[in-house]
Amino acid sequence: MPKPARKKSSLAAIENRRAALRSELAALDQQAREAEKAARDAGRDTLFAALGRVKISAMEKADARAIAKAIATHEAAEIAQKLAELERPTSARSTLAQSGLE
């Protein structure tokens, strides 16, 4: 029984293919870095639009940096939830208004 013919690859062909794959992988890595960079900044326009619609009292640079760092570090939903916790319930506001304390 004859053995099936083996396809022989030359070392040069293998090295050329390896170089082509490395080049393709490097291009994919660059695309991934650009996509990650864009994703990290995707909410900027939305946030600026929202900030443009509200009045913001004076604040220290350190406070502004801390707020910006929190936005950059945490998910928007987490920050929104924490900010919502700072809001007083409507019933508490009306109670304070009725008592003249607000």
Image (tube, rainbow, N blue to C red):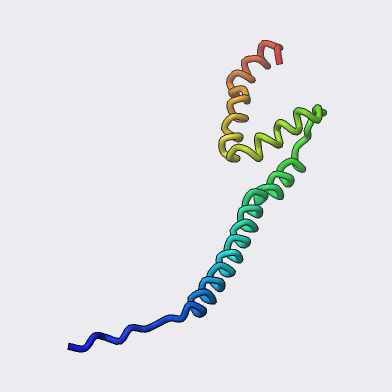
Residue 69: quarter of image: top right
- Residue at image x 62%, y 22%? 88
| Residue 62 percent across, percent down from the top left | 77, 28
Residue pictured at 71% horizontal, 43% vertical: 50
**Picture coordinates of residue 72, whole percent (x, y):** 66, 40
Determine whether, in the image, residue 91 is placed left or right of residue 8: right
Q: Looking at this view, name the residue that lies furthest to the left.
A: 1
- Quadrant where the image shows the C terminus: top right
Compared across the picture, whether 5 is left or right of 2 comes to right
Which residue is rendered at x = 62% and y = 56% of the image?
33
Q: Residue furthest bottom?
A: 2
Residue 43: % across, % down: 66, 48
Q: Residue 40 versus residue 26: which sits nearer the camera?
A: 26
Vertical relation: 97 (above or below) 53: above
Q: Horizontal placement of 18 versus 102: left or right? A: left
- Residue 44, compared with residue 18, is above or below; it is above
> Is residue 81 depicted above or below 6 in this figure?
above
Quadrant containing the N terminus is bottom left
Residue 24 picture quarter: bottom right
For the point 62% across and 30% down, which residue is it? 83
* Depth order, front residue of 19/32: 19
User: Total of numbered circles in the picture?
Assistant: 0
Above or below — where is 73 with respect to 62? below
In the rendered image, residue 51, in percent from the top left (x then y), is placed at 74, 41
